């Protein structure tokens, strides 16, 4: 069994331990640029003992942002990103950048550019129809991912996490629910996976082994006719055979259709509605119970599904979902996982890993109330954390 608190290799880099701060949107970039607040957010987690912290979410193009406040890779963002990686490295941790394109999850009204979707669909956040990308746009987005990976190296990131989940653009192409195309990018799983596989190949060709490459891949969209585990396993096997990734982090849910499938626990529907602009606020109050469904929390709640992927591939894997205390981490290591990713637990207690090392009986204080989630628009915060 791996020792989660000993140094470990991830592709070309070595982490001081096997615990990764997951990519949870920070809401600290009001001008789509790094702020001192964002740097302190990641510095604090790095000082708290993680092996690597992940900056979320860095869009590969302007229209690929979830909204206009999100960082995207451009010259003006580079100096701030370098300050961030320097601060993380000074605390002894590695830094990863999550890169991707929001696709149909993007707020087109906020971004001032049409959202992209594999097939025709109305985008409620932007109150516009999405653009269905033709080959030239697909090719451009592939290049954008490769360019983002190169830029990540320039500013000192040790790893990148390519977003293939939550029905962001590449994930939406994988989903038969969202992707109804009749060309080479629709229909069979091989066709639906083409965009993602081409993107991962372009990223690997662009950076070689100069940076670790992680892919965050949906196991289950959590919706009827979506991507489910059997097809996800096949995509994972293709990624392994292509040699384009150093590790896989398996996730679930659809930011577009079923966001709470990933975030188990309480559902703060009223707080979500209050945080939204009109007319989305009224829409959430009417249909919130159907859109923000409730799933009970339990520790390691994605372990069962992820273990089936683990059995099908030999790539290093990151376990996400309900990792809150030492017993869960040890369970993941015993099940053959190489790393674990923690999100809400570290938002509640940034120094949790250092305290686990000092006392293995330490348990997270996170209550899984999910009241942190509506705060992403003003600066993601644990409402239970003392000021």
Image (cartoon, rainbow, N blue to C red):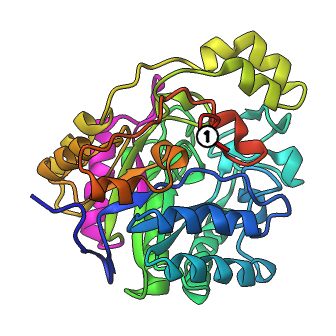
Q: Which residue is pictured at 21% across the width and 47% down the height?
A: 332
Tell me, yes or no, if residue 191 can be seen here: yes
Q: Nearer the viewer, residue 157 or 358?
A: 358
Q: Which residue is pictured at 71% across the width and 34% down the height?
A: 121
Residue 104 image offset from top left, x and y in percent = 68, 43
Q: Secondary structure at mark 1?
A: loop
Residue designated by label 1: 382
Tell me, yes or no, if residue 60 can be seen here: no
Residue 43 image offset from top left, x and y in percent = 57, 69
Q: Which residues are magenta?
A: 216-244
Q: Quadrant of residue 216?
A: bottom left
Residue 373 image offset from top left, x and y in percent = 64, 36
Residue 158 image offset from top left, x and y in percent = 46, 79
Q: Is residue 299 left or right of residue 195?
A: left
Q: Quadrant of the N terminus?
A: bottom left
Q: Residues within 10 Å of mark 1 (few under 14, many from 20)?
A: many
């Amino acid at each position: 069994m791996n020792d989660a608190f000993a140094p470990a290799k991830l592709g070309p880099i070595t982490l001081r331990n096997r615990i990764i701060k997951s990519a949870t949107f920070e809401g600290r970039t009001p001008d789509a640029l790094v702020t001192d607040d964002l740097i302190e957010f990641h510095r604090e987690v790095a000082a708290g003992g993680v092996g690597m912290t992940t900056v979320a979410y860095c869009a590969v193009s302007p229209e690929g942002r979830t909204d206009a406040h999100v960082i995207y890779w451009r010259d003006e963002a580079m100096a701030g990103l370098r300050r961030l990686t320097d601060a993380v490295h000074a605390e002894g941790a590695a830094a990863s950048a999550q890169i991707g394109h929001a696709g149909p999850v993007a707020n087109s009204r906020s971004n001032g550019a049409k959202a992209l979707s594999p097939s025709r669909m109305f985008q409620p956040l932007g109150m516009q129809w999405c653009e269905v990308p033709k080959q030239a746009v697909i090719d451009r987005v592939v290049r954008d991912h490769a360019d983002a990976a190169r830029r990540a190296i320039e500013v000192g990131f040790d790893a990148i996490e390519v977003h293939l989940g939550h029905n962001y653009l590449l994930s939406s192409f994988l989903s038969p629910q969202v992707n109804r195309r009749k060309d080479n990018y629709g229909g069979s799983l091989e066709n639906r996976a083409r965009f993602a596989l081409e993107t991962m190949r372009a990223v690997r060709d662009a950076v070689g082994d100069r940076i670790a490459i992680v892919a965050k891949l949906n196991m289950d969209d959590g919706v009827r006719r979506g991507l489910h585990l059997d097809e996800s396993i096949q995509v994972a096997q293709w990624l392994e055979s292509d040699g384009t990734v150093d590790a896989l982090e398996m996730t679930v849910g659809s930011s577009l259709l079923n966001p709470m499938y990933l975030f188990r626990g309480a559902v703060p529907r009223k707080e979500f509605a209050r945080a939204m602009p009109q007319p989305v606020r009224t829409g959430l109050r009417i249909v919130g119970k159907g859109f923000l469904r409730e799933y009970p929390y339990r520790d390691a709640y994605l372990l069962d599904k992820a273990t089936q992927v683990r059995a099908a591939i030999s790539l290093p894997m990151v376990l996400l979902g309900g990792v809150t205390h030492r017993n869960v981490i040890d369970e993941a290591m015993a099940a053959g996982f190489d790393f674990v990713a923690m999100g809400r637990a570290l938002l509640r207690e940034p120094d949790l890993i250092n305290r686990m090392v000092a006392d293995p009986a330490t348990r997270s204080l996170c209550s899984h109330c999910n009241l942190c989630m509506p705060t992403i628009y003003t600066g993601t915060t644990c409402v239970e954390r003392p000021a």
